[in-house]
Image (cartoon, grey):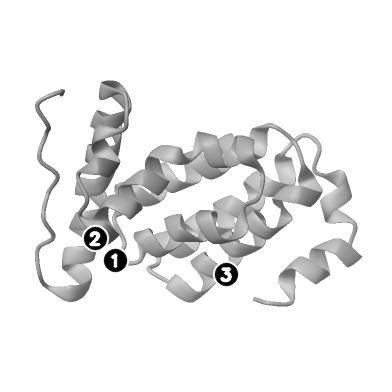
């Protein structure tokens, strides 16, 4: 998987993705791996797309990554939080990070269990983050066999 980004560059794929067709195709392959519960392939291909964000540099890619993460959440693999954390680690484009903020907040809450993470958000965003937390938690329970705490609405909800 580590060789895939370089292979895409050598093939000139990164320069020909202005319309998003190539990135969407690659994300479709990653999603197929998620459906097969093939963590190694799914995360590896997803990592490649995230690493290529700077080179593809088109506005739709952030939305495509967001749509991909939503699809993955529907399947609830136990390693979905890892895929969301990759955004934090690999993406440097602030516009893309802003689009994916609800996912990032959900993972931060799951890691810290700090309700302050939720309190900083607008109510409609908080609701979305809480839904993501529930979905990620459902996958995490399958992996480690224990329940994670669910976020409790604050007085400002």
Residue 57 falls in image quadrant: top right
On the picture, is 41 further left or further right than 149? right
Q: Which residue is mark 3?
A: 44
Q: In what element is the residue under mark 3?
A: helix
State the residue in front, 151 or 24: 151
On the picture, is 46 further left or further right than 155? right
Relative to 105, residue 154 above or below? above
On the picture, is 152 further left or further right than 67? left
Bin the neighbour count of mark 1 within 10 Å (Cα to Cα): few under 14, some 14-19, many 20 and up: some
Q: Which residue is mark 2?
A: 139
Quadrant of the image for the N terminus? bottom right
Relative to 34, residue 74 above or below? above
Q: Are marks 3 and 1 in contact (CB under 8 Å)?
A: no
Q: In what element is the residue under mark 1?
A: loop
State the residue in front, 130 or 24: 130
Q: CA distance from mark 3 to mark 1?
A: 16 Å
Residue appearing at x 12%, y 49% in the figure: 150
Q: CA distance from mark 3 to mark 2?
A: 19 Å
Residue 23 position within the rendered picture, expressed as x and y whole percent measured from the top left: 68, 48
Q: Which residue is mark 1?
A: 78
Q: Are marks 1 and 2 in contact (CB under 8 Å)?
A: yes
Residue 154 position within the rendered picture, expressed as x and y whole percent measured from the top left: 12, 32
Residue 49 position within the rendered picture, expressed as x and y whole percent measured from the top left: 65, 56
Q: In what element is the residue under mark 2?
A: helix
Specify which label sits upstream in the sequence, 1 or 2.
1
Bin the neighbour count of mark 3 within 10 Å (Cα to Cα): few under 14, some 14-19, many 20 and up: some
Residue 38 position within the rendered picture, expressed as x and y whole percent measured from the top left: 43, 72
State the residue in front, 87 or 19: 87
Residue appearing at x 81%, y 63% in the figure: 8
Q: CA distance from mark 1 to mark 2?
A: 4 Å
């Amino acid at each position: 998987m580590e060789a895939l980004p370089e292979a895409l560059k050598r093939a000139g794929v990164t320069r020909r993705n202005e319309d998003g067709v190539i990135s969407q195709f690659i994300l479709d392959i990653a999603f197929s791996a998620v459906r097969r519960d093939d963590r190694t392939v799914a995360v590896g291909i997803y990592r490649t797309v995230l690493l290529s964000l700077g080179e593809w540099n088109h506005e739709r890619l952030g939305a495509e990554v967001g749509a991909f993460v939503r699809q993955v959440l529907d399947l609830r693999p136990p390693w979905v939080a890892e895929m969301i954390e990759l955004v934090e680690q690999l993406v440097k484009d602030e516009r893309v990070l802003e689009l994916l903020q609800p996912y990032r907040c959900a993972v931060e809450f799951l890691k810290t269990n700090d309700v302050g993470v939720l309190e900083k958000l607008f109510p409609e965003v908080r609701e979305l983050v809480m839904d993501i937390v529930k979905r990620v938690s459902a996958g995490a329970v399958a992996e480690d066999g224990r329940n994670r705490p669910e976020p409790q609405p604050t007085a400002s909800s």
